[in-house]
Amino acid sequence: MQSGIVRSLAVVAVWLLTSKVQATDLTVQLNGIDGSRGGYVHAAIYREAMPFETYDANGAFATVSRQLSPAISPKPVLIAFTLADLPQGEYAVHFYHDANGNQQFDSSGSEPLEGWGFSNARHLWQTPSFKRSAFTIGTEAKTVSLKTFYIE
């Protein structure tokens, strides 16, 4: 009886060790960033609605920041980064151009003072939901392009 249980556990252990969880790479392209403003670009990648819809970077699956130099950054700038070996599933991205470097997305009332964008956003009349912004990571590498919105 014990040898049967041990044998079953051994088979399960071998299966777990040899079965590879399907994972793939995600490349995110942030288009149209005004590099002449300098500062930073902060992006967050989410797998769940709650942290995405409340802009909670602490609940993000991953975060990425890049510094811009106004002296060498032309306008517009494309920033791209790749995250490797992501598990399959639904993801959404949002980012903002922190031009003054204060680590916050600045606004005056409801009007943004800095550039921002979301995955799957063609225009931003309102903040999109996770469901609307989500895209699927499958077994193939994926690239998503996000547009930067500025209110001038």
Image: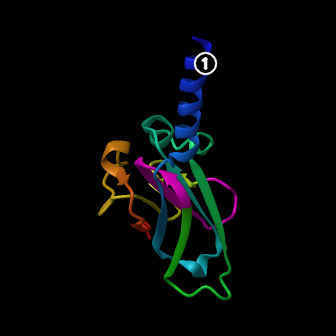
Q: Is residue 40 left or right of residue 118?
A: right
What's under tag 1, amino acid-wise? Ser
Q: Nearer the viewer, residue 51 or 99?
A: 51
In the rendered view, tell whether residue 130 sits above or below residue 71: above
Q: What SS does tag 1 mark? A: helix
Kindly identify the residue that appears in the image at 56 percent across and 69 percent down.
Answer: 81
In the rendered view, tell whether residue 66 sits above or below residue 129: below
Kindly identify the residue that appears in the image at 57 percent across and 55 percent down.
Answer: 106
User: How many labels, in total?
Assistant: 1
Q: Main secondary structure of the magenta part?
A: strand
Q: Quadrant of the C terminus?
A: bottom left
Residue 86 forms part of the magenta stretch? yes
Q: Is residue 23 visible?
A: yes
- Give coordinates of residue 40: x percent, y percent: 64, 67
In the rendered view, tell whether residue 137 sits above or below residue 59: below
Residue to which mark 1 is pinned: 3
Kindly identify the residue that appears in the image at 59 percent across and 82 percent down.
Answer: 36
Kindly identify the residue that appears in the image at 53 percent across and 73 percent down.
Answer: 80
Q: Is residue 108 visible?
A: no
- Give coordinates of residue 45: x percent, y percent: 51, 52
Residue 124 forms part of the magenta stretch? no
User: Mark 1, residues whose alpha carbon is within 10 Å: few (<14), some, or many (≥20)?
Assistant: few
The quadrant holding residue 129 is top left
Q: Which range of residues does the magenta coloring cover?
A: 84-104
